[in-house]
Image (spheres, rainbow, N blue to C red):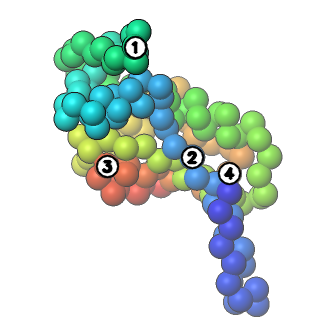
Amino acid sequence: MVCFAGNASQNPKLQVEVTYVHSYEEALRRELLWTTGSTPGAGKINREAHRKIVAVGEIVSTAEDVSRLAASIVDLFKKKRAKRYPRGTILLIAFDDPTFFGFDHWQLLFQSIENLGGLTGGFGEVHLLNCGSNELIAA
């Protein structure tokens, strides 16, 4: 939790909880990218014997990719909501996808999130941050 405080008489405390959508598969993709210079964006990936990462590329639609991201965001939100935070805490859910940008992607993402139950309850505000495109959107 990040807590910003200024002059108490002028600025009340701003409580922010920051969390990051990240899976084991994404960690493997990032490691493969760092070590070889390329990695498929989708498809099966795993670590085999002798620490070798094996990835098989796969073509997926934007809708599939957005649905996977939405499920990860909703799952992470539910885990955070189950904990107790001070009233009014702002939740910032970050993810890193440089191919995800623009109004159409965000519209698909929010529709997928709503279909999975939404991001309501437990926080004063919820914001999504795409670190790959520097887009910050209120949920």
Outermost residue on the front side: it is 50
Could you tell which of marks 1 and 2 lies nearer the N-terminus? Answer: 2
The alpha-carbon separation of the residues under discs 1 and 3 comes to 31 Å
As helix, strand or loop, the secondary structure at mark 4 comes to loop
Residue assigned mark 1 = 50
In the picture, the disc for residue 123 is 4
Outermost residue on the top side: it is 49
User: Where residue 137 sits: x, y (%)?
Assistant: 42, 54
As helix, strand or loop, the secondary structure at mark 3 comes to loop
Residue assigned mark 3 = 132
Q: Nearer the viewer, mark 1 or mark 2?
A: 1
Q: Is residue 113 visible?
A: no
The alpha-carbon separation of the residues under discs 2 and 4 comes to 13 Å
In the picture, the disc for residue 86 is none
CB contact under 8 Å: marks 1 and 3: no
Q: Residue at x 71, y 46 (%)?
A: 122
Could you tell which of marks 1 and 4 lies nearer the N-terminus? Answer: 1
Q: Say which amino acid is labelled 4.
A: Phe
Could you tell which of marks 2 and 3 lies nearer the N-terminus? Answer: 2
Residue assigned mark 2 = 19
The alpha-carbon separation of the residues under discs 3 and 4 comes to 25 Å
Q: Say which amino acid is labelled 3.
A: Gly
As helix, strand or loop, the secondary structure at mark 1 comes to helix
Q: Residue at x 31, y 49 (%)?
A: 132
The alpha-carbon separation of the residues under discs 1 and 2 comes to 32 Å
Q: Residues within 10 Å of mark 3 (few under 14, many from 20)?
A: some
Q: Residues within 10 Å of mark 1 (few under 14, many from 20)?
A: few
Q: Say which amino acid is labelled 1.
A: His
120 vs 50, nearest the viewer:
50
CB contact under 8 Å: marks 1 and 2: no
